[in-house]
């Protein structure tokens, strides 16, 4: 099988870094956070509360694709990849990439962004939501809700990827990963 190259995608606050890093451990491959590949000008712009435009993103997306393609044993990259044309740009550099879109409701995204220190301020969430184009059926990848424990979400993604023999083919979106139900306390235990 070809080395697996995965982009864990979604808006800021969706858990790309946490899930992506855990997924890389499960797959025994390298992890890269695409935030680390942004040119300084992009970080300065976002930190000032200004959303990036396509001209800002283009060289960054090319770098993301090149880095992913250059990981000899495969790898996982956490990258927003909000629009289809951004994903196509990554695929131009890393043709076998598979996208895993993390879905999280708006209120939870806001809560997560407000509770962390990051150069992307919560004020830019609206621009991220507006730009988001969910994966389409003909794109290589699938979407899953990022609810539950990070390690369980990553393990579910790894399991789903393990059954996917052709990394550059679309993955059947009807296959879903359901997080496990919370454990039931033993009889007589207090809730």
Image (cartoon, rainbow, N blue to C red):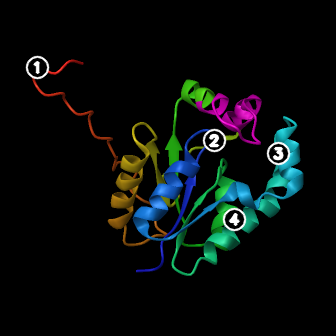
Give left or right: position of 142 versus 70. Answer: left
- Name the residue at the front extreme: 189
Dot 3 or dot 4, earlier in sequence:
3
Question: Which of 96 and 80 lies nearest the eye of the viewer?
Answer: 80
- Spatial separation of the CA atoms under disc 1 and disc 2: 43 Å
Q: Main secondary structure of the magenta part?
A: helix
Q: Nearer the viewer, mark 4 or mark 1?
A: 1
Element at badge 2?
loop
Could you tell me which residue is drawn at 85 percent across and 53 percent down?
Answer: 56
Residue under label 4: 64
Q: Is residue 97 visible?
A: yes
Q: Are the residues flagged by discs 3 and 2 in contact, CB closer than 8 Å?
A: no
The question of residue 156 being in magenta is answered with: no
> The C terminus appears in which quarter of the rendering?
top left
Disc 1 crowd rating (10 Å Cα; few below 14, some 14-19, many 20+) is few
Residue 82 vs 22, above or below: the answer is above
- Spatial separation of the CA atoms under disc 3 and disc 4: 16 Å
The question of residue 119 being in magenta is answered with: yes
Specify start and end residues of the magenta stretch as a single range. Answer: 112-130
Could you tell me which residue is drawn at 18 percent across and 27 percent down?
Answer: 185
Dot 1 or dot 2, earlier in sequence:
2
Residue under label 1: 188
- Spatial separation of the CA atoms under disc 2 and disc 4: 16 Å
Give left or right: position of 113 versus 158. Answer: right
Residue under label 3: 52
**Residue 11: mark:** 2
**Residue 47, x across and y down, in percent:** 83, 40
**Residue 184, x across and y down, in percent:** 19, 29
Q: Are the residues flagged by discs 1 and 2 in contact, CB closer than 8 Å?
A: no
């Amino acid at each position: 099988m070809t080395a697996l190259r995965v982009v864990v995608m979604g808006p800021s606050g969706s858990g790309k870094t946490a899930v992506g890093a855990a997924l890389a451990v499960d797959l025994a491959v390298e992890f890269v956070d695409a935030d680390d590949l942004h040119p300084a000008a992009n970080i300065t712009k976002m930190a000032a509360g200004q959303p990036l435009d396509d001209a800002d993103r283009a060289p960054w997306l090319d770098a993301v694709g090149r880095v992913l393609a250059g990981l000899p044993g495969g790898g996982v990259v956490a990258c927003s990849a909000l629009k289809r044309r951004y994903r196509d740009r990554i695929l131009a550099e890393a043709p076998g990439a598979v996208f895993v879109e993390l879905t999280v409701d708006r209120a939870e995204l806001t809560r997560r962004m407000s509770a962390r220190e990051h150069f992307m301020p919560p004020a830019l969430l609206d621009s991220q939501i507006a730009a988001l184009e969910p994966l389409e059926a003909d794109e290589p990848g699938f979407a899953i809700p990022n609810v539950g424990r990070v390690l369980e979400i990553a393990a579910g993604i790894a399991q789903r990827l393990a059954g996917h023999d052709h990394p550059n083919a679309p993955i059947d979106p009807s296959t879903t990963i359901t997080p496990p139900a919370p454990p039931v306390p033993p009889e007589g235990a207090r809730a």
